[in-house]
Amino acid sequence: MSIDLHCHSTVSDGALTPAEVVLRASANGCTLLALTDHDHTGGLAAAHAQAKQSGITLINGAEISVSWRGRTIHIVGLNISPEDEVLQTLLGRLRSGRLQRLQAIADKLAKKGISDAYEGTLALATNIDMVTRTHIADFLVRSGHVNKKADAFRKYLGDGKSCSVKHQWAELAEVVTAIRHAGGIAVIAHPMRYELSATARRNLFSDFKACGGEAIEVHSGRSNLNDRLNYALLAQQFDFLASCGSDFHRDGDFGGGLLGCCPELPPICKPVWDHLAD
Ligand code: AMP
Ligand code: MN
Ligand code: MN
Ligand code: MN
C-alpha cells in the first residue's frame, strides 16, 4: 500500500495534468492519492475520472496559502467538498491577490532591468487563474535572465531576495474554518521546511490546534528518518493525526519526492487516512 496525500498538477504549479498525475502515481504503485493544488480545486474532476479508470482512490484536496505571524505557512485540506461556497470564496480571493502580487514583483523586476515579467509570466502560466512564483521563475529562465529556476529564487524571488514582495495570504483560523466547513481535515504542510525556532513551532501548532487543525505532515518530499521521528513525536504531543505527501511538482524538482510514494510513518503515528471517508 502506497499513500501520497500532497501533490500538484498543471492547475497550479505542477508539470503534469491532473489525469497524468493520477496515471503516474498509479504506475508508481500508489493506492490512495490526494491532489492538493495550491489555492485551487479545479483539477479534481479530471483526476477523479482518471482515478476511476486506474482503480486508485482519490481524495479531494487543496494546499492553501496562509500568513501566520508574518510568515507564509501552507495548510493542506483533505477530504474537502469542492462545491463548498465558503471554501471557494476564500480560494478565489487568494487567487486574485496573486495577480496583484505578480504585478508588484514585475515592478521590482523592471527596476532591475527585466521588463515584461507580468505579461511574460501570464503567457507561461499553465492556469492563468493560478499564478505562482514557479511561473515567474519559469519566465526568468526562458527569457534568459537566469539559467535555472532555483537561481531565480536565489537571486530574485526567494523570501527576502531583491524582488520578493511581502504578501498577505489568508488568516490561519479562516483557512482551517473553511476547510472544516467544507467537511475536510486541516493539515500543516511540510512543517520541517519553515525554519521555525522550537518556540515558534509550538506557537504555530498551538494556534493551529486552537482553531480546529487536526493533522500535520510527518513526512514531506525527501524528509529523512530523523525528521519523521521528530514530527511523529510532536504529532503525539499535540495529539495531531499524521499525514504524508511527496509534494511532487515535476521530475527533478527542488524538495519534491517520487509521486505516489511515501515511506512508512513511525508506528506511534495515528494516520490521517483512517479518518478519510471513501
Ligand atoms: P507562491 O505560492 O506563488 O509563493 O509559490 C510558491 C511555490 O514556489 C512553492 O509552492 C514551490 O513550488 C515553489 N518554490 C518556493 N521556493 C522555491 C525554491 N527555492 N526553489 C524552487 N521552487 C520554489
Ligand atoms: Mn508549489
Ligand atoms: Mn507548500
Ligand atoms: Mn505543495
Image (cartoon, rainbow, N blue to C red):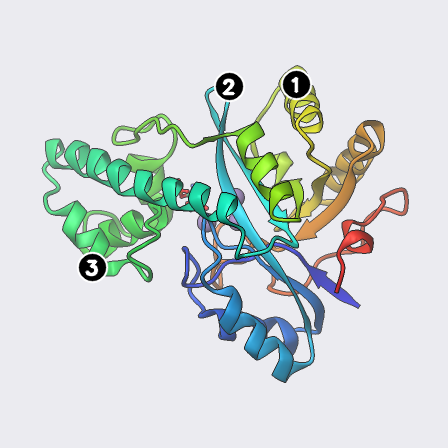
Residue at position x 10%, y 43% in the image: 115
Q: Amino acid at mark 2?
A: Arg
Q: Amino acid at mark 1?
A: Asn
The quarter of the rendered structure image containing the N terminus is bottom right
Question: Foreground residue, 160 or 71?
Answer: 71
Labels 3 and 2: the sequence-earlier one: 2
Q: CA distance from mark 3 to mark 2?
A: 34 Å
Which residue carries the number 2 mark? 69
Which residue carries the number 3 mark? 123
Q: Residue furthest front?
A: 85
Instruction: Give coordinates of residue 16: x percent, y percent.
Output: 45, 69
Q: Amino acid at mark 3?
A: Ala
Marks 2 & 1, CB-CB < 8 Å contact: yes
The quarter of the rendered structure image containing the C terminus is bottom right
Which residue carries the number 1 mark? 203
Residue at position x 65%, y 65% in the image: 260
